[in-house]
Image (cartoon, grey):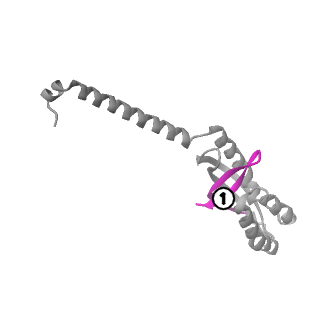
Amino acid sequence: MSTPATSRQHPHLLGAALVLALVAAGAVAAAMAWLGVRADADPAAQQEALREARSRVPLLLSYDVATLDDDLDRAIDQTTGEFRDDYAEILDKSVRKLAAKRGISTVAEVVGAGVVDGDEDRVTVLVLVNQTATGRSGEPVVLGSRIEVEMVPDGDTWRIAGYTPL
């Protein structure tokens, strides 16, 4: 244990300890700054992904029974990667058949969206959606939902690479 007498006897130890403390504090500050910048590595990319999510989600979730094939093809065009194949299968096996059989059309509207996390390679966007579905009865049903979409760069744009209802 160091006492005032020991500190006076070895002033270079106190100076070395202060220097080490300052270096350690500087390293911690630098690491925190780097991590903060990394978490928000590219605000421009995040804003572009957010803008694309706001425009692509309605296209992903909207279709009219009268133009079903074209609308579902357009929906698939909003996606990329493995999600593209998975979503195409869902549309083909479920949505296409059910919409045609029951005469269902939907219109999706983004009512809010914000970046949850991301960098220049992947951005997670929380999207609030109102989806109005109309069947043969003509009585519209409005459903609200929260969705996390994973946006990834695809050429000079961003596409949906994942979709998680919350």
Q: Nearer the viewer, residue 68 or 107?
A: 68
Q: Position of residue 132 (x, y in %)?
A: 72, 60
Q: Residue 85 is drawn in which quadrant?
A: bottom right
Q: Position of residue 40 (x, y in %)?
A: 57, 41
Q: Position of residue 81 (x, y in %)?
A: 72, 59
Residue 111 in sight: yes
Q: Which residue is mark 1?
A: 162
Specify the farthest residue to the left: 5
Q: Nearer the viewer, residue 120 or 50?
A: 120
Q: Residue at x 29, y 29 (%)?
A: 16
Q: Residue at x 35, y 30 (%)?
A: 22
**Which quadrant of the figure contains the C terminus?**
bottom right
Residue 107 in sight: no
Q: Nearer the viewer, residue 80 or 140?
A: 80
Rendered view: 1 above or below 131? above
Q: Which residues are magenta?
A: 140-166
SS at circle 1: strand
Q: Position of residue 38 (x, y in %)?
A: 55, 41
Residue type at the position of mark 1: Gly
